[in-house]
């Protein structure tokens, strides 16, 4: 039997070609012009915060997917290393960016043991897929991968915006969802929606000087530093 975390990898491998429709509010995720405008305005808030930081030497992006955020990070870092468990996601990301200073590696982040320290770590829409019993070890690995004083930036879902019959997403409880691809294939994955205050406390307990903020409807984001 495949475990939920294996299913999660398989889901994203299969979803790779249709993944961008979610972020760019196309197809099943098109909820009309007013919704798209609000979404774009909130994306812009996160972009502005991300680009308010100074350029740095080496950025590590965890679970980069198709490159929606990698393309931003490529403007901020002399070098970007992107680690994802899906070769299909990496292939799309690589083709989209075609950037010599972005390097990719296949990696299961639940087995990941960082070997070096970077200036900035970023992960988008990944933390919500980390099961509660693996959150602490994941955040310890993130801390180990970041130099003291290095920047941590996180963006994730605020509301279960995609939980609706049109997108085939169904809640299976506080930490699980059933997801459906356009061709009807179904997968069970981890999805946890955090409250900003509680997530801020968890991140601080793990050695980050950080504050989680929320946009009006869609996103949580956090921009902070690894404490010494
Ligand atoms: C929700 S997508 C986020 C992609 C991208 N960061 C974004 O914001 O568009 C989740 C990503 O996590 C990757 N992933 C799933 N399980 C993983 C694992 N165990 N280790 C590494 N990456 C994983 C998927 O392949 C996918 O690219």
Image: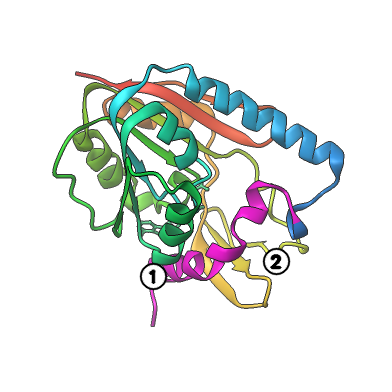
Q: Which residue is drawn at 43% across and 34% down?
A: 73
Residue 183 falls in which quadrant of the image? bottom right
Of residues 199 and 59, the one drawn nearer to the viewer in this rendering:
59
Residue 150 falls in which quadrant of the image? top left
Q: What stretch is highlighted in magenta?
A: 1-26
Left or right, 1 with reference to 183: left
Secondary structure, mark 1, is helix
Colour scheme of the picture: rainbow
Left or right, 200 with reference to 215: left
Where, quadrant-wise, is the N terminus in this rendering? Answer: bottom left
Magenta region includes residue 201: no
Vertical placement of residue 141 versus 188, above or below: above
Secondary structure, mark 2, is loop
Distance Cα–Cα, label 1 vs label 2: 20 Å
For residue 6, which numbered disc appears in the image?
A: 1
Where, quadrant-wise, is the C terminus in this rendering? Answer: top left
Whole-percent x and y of residue 2? 39, 78
Whole-percent x and y of residue 226? 27, 23
Name the outermost residue toward the bottom: 1
Name the outermost residue toward the left: 115
Left or right, 137 with reference to 214: left
According to the picture, the residue beneath numbered tag 2 turns out to be 168
- Most prominent secondary structure in the magenta stretch? helix
Q: In which quarter of the image is ligand 1?
A: bottom left
Residue 18 in view in this figure: yes
């Amino acid at each position: 039997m495949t475990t939920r975390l294996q299913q999660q990898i398989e889901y994203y491998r299969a979803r790779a070609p249709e993944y961008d429709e979610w972020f760019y509010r196309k197809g099943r995720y098109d909820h009309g012009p007013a919704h798209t405008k609000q979404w774009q305005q909130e994306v812009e808030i996160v972009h502005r915060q991300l680009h308010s930081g100074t350029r740095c030497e080496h950025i590590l992006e965890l679970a980069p997917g198709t490159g929606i955020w990698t393309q931003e990070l490529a403007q901020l870092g002399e070098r970007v290393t992107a680690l994802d468990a899906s070769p299909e996601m990496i292939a799309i990301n690589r083709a989209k960016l075609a950037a010599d200073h972005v390097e990719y590696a296949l990696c299961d982040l639940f087995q990941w043991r960082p070997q070096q320290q970077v200036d900035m770590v970023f992960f988008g829409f990944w933390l919500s897929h980390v099961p509660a019993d693996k959150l602490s070890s994941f955040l310890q690995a993130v801390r180990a991968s970041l130099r003291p004083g290095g920047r941590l930036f996180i963006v994730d879902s605020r509301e279960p915006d995609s939980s609706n019959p049109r997108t085939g997403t169904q809640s299976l409880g506080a930490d699980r969802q059933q997801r459906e691809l356009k061709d009807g294939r179904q997968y069970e994955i981890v999805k946890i929606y955090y409250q900003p205050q509680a997530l801020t406390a968890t991140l601080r307990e793990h050695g980050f000087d950080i504050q989680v903020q929320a946009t009006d409807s869609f996103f949580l984001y956090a921009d902070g530093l690894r404490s010494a």
